[in-house]
Image: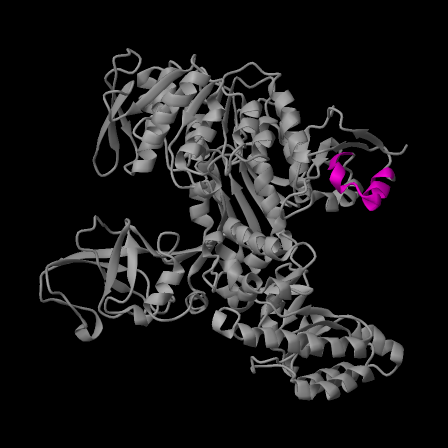
């Protein structure tokens, strides 16, 4: 039976799962795939692949339905396909109709910051009173919201969904999907300001979420929010009860608080009996957490939860790490730390991340019971079993009564424990070796204790790598070069200090075309960690040729000497033309032309002999011809760059004519992609730009810094004027000072040139200059006037202290700082 194709009709599907990313497929027979043609990815490219994997329901866009795609889908047997104007709108409409089936209270949360934290805390605080469905992680976008709402089923008694927007006209669609009855507007800040004409316009657009709400909780101290609510929302939704809180007497609830070292005491005052003279101890002292807690407090009071019960629940709140972190573990393991909650969607996300990692072949999952899913246990744990199999988990550590009760549905090798304490008491660290270990548990199980036991113990200096920022930067450059140009990413020098294997895994997942490393050993390490992408080696040597062949690594050929050595090695064994052909076709080479950099490469004078040699070996495959721009980052060199490009195109053309085919041509680096887009040719080479540094400084705001380099305060001393600090007594105190010793030195990558006040670090938001000389393992900084104590976090560089600024302090470039971070520094990779 051939495919049934529906044209612009309502999507009537029996699918249990909505899919927009082909890489996240789990249950193909129960899935409907929405092929979305976005700015950076086109889902239509993966329709045929998903059909082969068992998907039988598809939504495609008419504008993408060319003859080739039409012929493809018409060949699908027993498939149902909807052709629509917009797959995104179709996805949203499916979710909107699904939401309309349920008449339960729904909390809708928006704002610039705190949405996800408030949502997660409310989920914890209300777990005893409601069976809750909520957004997984920070699923608050035009795609994330429909996927979140799709989880609703007949067992749920409360929904909690967050909504985020980046430009006008987006919130209306999210309101229609969420249909909140209670609203929380957390705050307003600068996030996504660029998508709106003004801050007021952004507030007005966010308020569209609450046009049908019965109640709205907000902090009136944000005057932009307060004014727009009273000006606009009152007229659009006059029945909405406005529950304002803040410091003003005009608020419905006046909030006051004072702090000690460990908690904040919040007093809520109001003429309304529900809120009057309430005192709560909040277990946080930072402003953001206190604000988020007060939103939660007021909502619980609004829902009628007794104050005494609220006090107990609030006291149990803990900071939530919304990040999914990849860390080094003991015994050559990697740990995936996702310990803040455990629900089916979150588990699916975590297992997808686990399946993307190929550093270790043995995959282990440590899971707690899934709480309050609303599903029958036999159905739920059968689904979990399927997930574990689909994502390649070979061993399960299951903790909780429910897992024990449903052990018959789990078909992978498993061990069962009633509590986390039971597991830790019997834990033998030797049982975890050479494995990828996912640790995911609901908050009551305190799985952070398991992470602590299994994590590799190193000192407190760490480089945190934001994989979402890496993806953002990759997509920025992808958008610049378009779909027709391939991308080679440089992961040499330990991926610019960020961690080669982990970064390469992400790039492989996002389907880049090539990787490049400096030396063969770097390529071997990538292959041993499961990287299958083509890899170019920029500095091959005869001693590594066997490794190149063994691990399918492609050498850069830049001189007659290295070419002769490669040909001699390749042709020394085979004796017949067929044997030569079989051997040679497996490892292509890359020809480097020197057009003006004068580092490596064949010059114009070298080309005739190069062509002659290549023609003598017609089975030798040239994968690419490339060159390197010497001054793409500076306008003063524009004419030279143009001449380099012209020389390169001319040389590449001669090679193409001689070879009888066209190898890939590439000359643009990160700087060139931005400044010379017309020179993109067949491929570009993305280097430092991926890591968040735009060397031209023209598009720096469009990139995200991927790394936060941090350490801790080891000790604080209060010293009188006249004392000296450090080696050679180079730090002389002119006044009484507070000196903080931080656990980082030049052996970690904190350059000695930062000595004597040149370098500054951030401690609790304050810049603290270096005093005296940077030591090998420690540095002393002046923290006078800063509230600081032992164990406090210290930022070397990050979002609030950009690495570019740090490099400027010592007259160097960001490359040097990144690649100078020692491998003894722990890398933690995370996704939001």
In this orientation, does residue 376 appear?
A: no
Horizontal side of 706 relative to 277 (left or right) equals right
Horizontal side of 304 relative to 326 (left or right) equals left
Magenta stretch contains residue 439: no
- Closer to the camera, 612 or 502? 612
Q: Main secondary structure of the magenta part?
A: helix
- Closer to the camera, 162 or 598? 598
- Closer to the camera, 352 or 619? 619
Q: Residue at x 45, y 26 (%)?
A: 207
Relative to 811, is 602 above or below? below
Horizontal side of 15 relative to 267 (left or right) equals right
Q: Residue at x 24, y 61 (%)?
A: 769
Relative to 518, is 721 above or below? above
Q: Quadrant of residue 381?
A: top right
Q: Residue at x 77, y 73 (%)?
A: 621
Colour setup of the view: one colour
Q: Position of residue 796 (x, y in %)?
A: 34, 58
- Closer to the camera, 330 or 355? 355
Magenta stretch contains residue 62: yes
Q: Which residues are magenta?
A: 57-74
Q: Residue furthest right?
A: 1
């Amino acid at each position: 039976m051939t495919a049934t194709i529906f044209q612009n009709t309502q999507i009537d599907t029996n699918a249990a799962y909505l899919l927009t990313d082909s890489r996240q497929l789990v249950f193909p027979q129960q899935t409907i795939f929405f092929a979305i043609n976005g700015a950076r990815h086109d889902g239509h490219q993966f329709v045929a692949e998903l059909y082969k994997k068992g998907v039988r329901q598809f939504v495609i866009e008419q504008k993408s339905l060319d003859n080739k795609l039409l012929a493809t889908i018409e060949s699908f047997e027993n498939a149902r396909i909807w052709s629509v104007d917009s797959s995104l709108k179709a996805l949203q409409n499916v979710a909107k109709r699904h939401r309309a089936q349920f008449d339960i209270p729904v909390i809708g949360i928006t704002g610039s910051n705190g949405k996800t934290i408030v949502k997660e805390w409310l989920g914890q605080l209300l777990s005893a009173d409601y069976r809750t469905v909520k957004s997984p992680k920070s699923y608050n976008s035009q795609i994330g919201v429909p996927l979140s709402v799709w989880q609703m089923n007949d067992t749920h008694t409360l929904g909690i969904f967050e909504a985020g927007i980046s430009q006008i006209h987006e919130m209306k669609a999210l309101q229609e999907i969420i249909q909140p009855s209670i609203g929380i507007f957390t705050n307003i800040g600068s996030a996504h300001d660029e998508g709106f004409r003004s801050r007021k316009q952004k507030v007005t657009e966010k308020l569209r979420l609450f046009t049908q709400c019965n109640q709205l909780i907000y902090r009136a101290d944000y005057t932009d929010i307060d004014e727009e609510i009273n000006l606009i929302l009152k007229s659009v939704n006059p029945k909405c009860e406005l529950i304002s809180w803040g410091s003003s007497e005009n608020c419905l609830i006046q909030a006051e608080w004072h702090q000690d070292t460990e908690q904040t005491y919040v007093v809520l005052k109001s003429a309304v009996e529900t809120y009057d003279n309430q005192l709560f101890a909040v277990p946080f002292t930072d402003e953001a957490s206190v604000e988020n807690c007060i939103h939660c407090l007021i909502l619980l009071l609004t829902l009628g939860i007794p104050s005494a019960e609220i006090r107990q629940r609030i006291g149990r709140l803990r900071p939530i790490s919304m990040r999914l972190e990849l860390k080094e573990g003991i015994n050559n393991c990697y740990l995936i730390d996702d310990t803040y909650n455990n629900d089916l969607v979150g588990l699916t996300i975590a297992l997808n991340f686990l399946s993307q990692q190929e550093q270790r072949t043995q995959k282990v999952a440590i899971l707690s019971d899934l709480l309050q899913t609303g599903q029958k246990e036999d159905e739920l744990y059968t689904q979990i079993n399927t997930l574990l199999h689909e994502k390649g988990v070979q061993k399960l550590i299951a903790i909780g009564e429910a897992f024990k009760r449903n052990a018959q549905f789990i078909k992978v090798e498993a061990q069962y424990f009633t509590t986390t304490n039971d597991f830790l008491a019997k834990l033998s660290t030797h049982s975890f070796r050479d494995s990828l270990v996912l640790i995911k548990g609901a908050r009551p199980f305190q799985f952070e204790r398991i992470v602590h036991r299994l994590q590799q113990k190193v000192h407190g200096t760490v480089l945190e790598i934001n994989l979402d920022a890496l993806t953002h930067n990759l997509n920025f450059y992808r958008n610049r070069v378009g779909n027709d140009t391939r991308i080679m990413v440089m992961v040499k020098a330990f991926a610019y200090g960020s961690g080669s294997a982990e970064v390469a895994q992400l790039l492989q997942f996002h389907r880049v075309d090539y990787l490049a490393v400096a030396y063969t050993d770097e390529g071997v390490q990538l292959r041993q960690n499961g990287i299958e992408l083509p890899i170019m080696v920029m500095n091959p040597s005869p001693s590594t040729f066997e490794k190149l062949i063994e691990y399918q690594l492609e050498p850069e050929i830049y001189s007659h000497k290295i070419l002769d050595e490669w040909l001699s090695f390749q042709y020394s064994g085979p004796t017949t033309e067929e044997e030569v052909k079989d051997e040679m076709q497996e490892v292509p080479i890359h020809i480097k032309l020197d057009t003006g950099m004068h580092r490596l490469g064949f010059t114009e004078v070298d080309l005739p002999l190069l062509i002659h040699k290549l023609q003598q070996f017609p089975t030798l495959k040239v994968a690419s011809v490339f060159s390197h721009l010497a001054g793409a980052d500076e306008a003063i060199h524009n004419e030279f760059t143009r001449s380099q490009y012209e020389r390169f195109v001319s040389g590449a053309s001669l090679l193409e004519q001689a070879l009888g085919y066209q190898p890939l041509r590439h000359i643009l680096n990160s700087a060139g992609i931005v400044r010379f887009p017309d020179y993109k040719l067949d491929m570009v080479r993305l280097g430092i730009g991926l890591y968040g540094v735009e060397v031209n400084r023209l598009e720096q705001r469009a990139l995200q810094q991927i790394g936060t380099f941090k350490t801790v305060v080891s000790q604080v001393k209060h010293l009188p004027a006249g004392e000296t600090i450090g080696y050679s007594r180079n730090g002389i105190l002119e006044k009484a000072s507070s000196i903080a010793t931080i656990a980082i030195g030049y052996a970690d990558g904190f350059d000695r040139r930062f000595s004597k006040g040149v370098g500054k670090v951030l401690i609790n938001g304050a810049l603290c200059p270096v005093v005296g000389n940077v030591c090998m393992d420690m540095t002393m900084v002046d923290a006078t006037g800063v509230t600081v104590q032992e164990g406090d976090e210290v930022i070397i560089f990050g979002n609030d202290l950009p690495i570019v600024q740090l490099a400027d302090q010592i007259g160097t470039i960001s490359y040097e700082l990144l690649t100078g971070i020692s491998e003894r520094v722990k890398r933690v990779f995370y996704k939001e």
